[in-house]
Amino acid sequence: MIVLVLNLALVAGLVAVGIMAHSLGVLAAGGDYLADAFAIVVSLVAITLGRRPPTRRRPNGYPRATAIAALTNGVFLALVVVVVFVEAARRLVDGVGAVDGPPVIVASGIAAVVMLIGAFILGGDDDDDEDTNGDRANMRAVLLDTLADAAAAAGVAATGAIILVTGGMYWLDPAVALVVTVVIGYHVAALLRDVIRTMRRTDAAT
């Protein structure tokens, strides 16, 4: 819930700064955080369903609820990675417009710090030995997305700083985006593999 509130606050701030600074990257980050907020809501609902006691209609409860939520979030994040990768490549080929550096640095730097705090909060339960109904895989999906957002925000902030100092080099914006998408894509693949394994174990147990 704390990370959900942080995401919604960042959406409002990043959209305002993105419009003011004419930064597509910052606006895209705001849209990404809005999608993250939706993913967190899905995860919370899934965890609630997964922990419901068995009933006559559902003697096994909802054993796959959290795993399905993690799979959904992972697939959605993979689609976002593909879209950003394609757009970044297009901008490198077609050219990049001017970006106002200072607002990008401030907004992206704050976003990176907030997302790191969120990742610390989410990672606090990772030492739990029991993976009830795939809860760990589900929350790992949200944690991964949060860490990815922190890395992306830090990259955008660093790019904004270089653009400010050099007075140009706008091509760094899509270049950094390409690097971030490759790193995120690698971790998404590992996440999806773990989720599939969790779902298979759940099916075997039921």
Image (cartoon, helix red, strand yellow):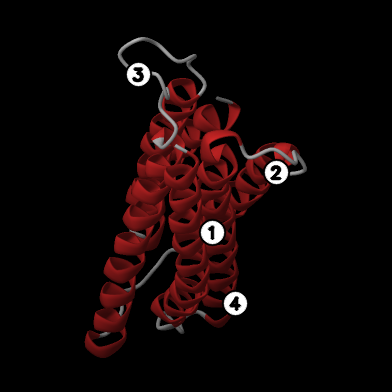
* Up-down relation of residue 205 to residue 75 (above or below): above
Q: Quadrant of the C terminus?
A: top left
Question: Alpha carbon of mark 2 to alpha carbon of mark 1: how far?
Answer: 14 Å
The x, y position of residue 66, in whole percent, is 45, 36
Q: Which residue is mark 1?
A: 148
Q: Which residue is mark 3?
A: 58
> Crowding at label 4, few (<14), some or many (≥20) Cα neighbours within 10 Å?
few
Q: Secondary structure at mark 2?
A: helix
Residue drawn at x 44%, y 52% is 200
Give amino acid for label 1: Ala
Question: Alpha carbon of mark 2 to alpha carbon of mark 4: how far?
Answer: 36 Å
Give amino acid for label 4: Val
| N-term mark: 2 or 4 | 2
Residue drawn at x 41%, y 37% is 64
Q: Secondary structure at mark 1?
A: helix
* Up-down relation of residue 157 to residue 50 (above or below): below
| N-term mark: 1 or 4 | 1
Question: Alpha carbon of mark 1 to alpha carbon of mark 3: how far?
Answer: 36 Å
* Up-down relation of residue 52 to residue 188 (above or below): above
Give amino acid for label 2: Gly
Along the viewing direction, whichever of 22 and 158 lies nearer the viewer: 158
Residue drawn at x 60%, y 77% is 165
Q: Which residue is mark 4?
A: 165
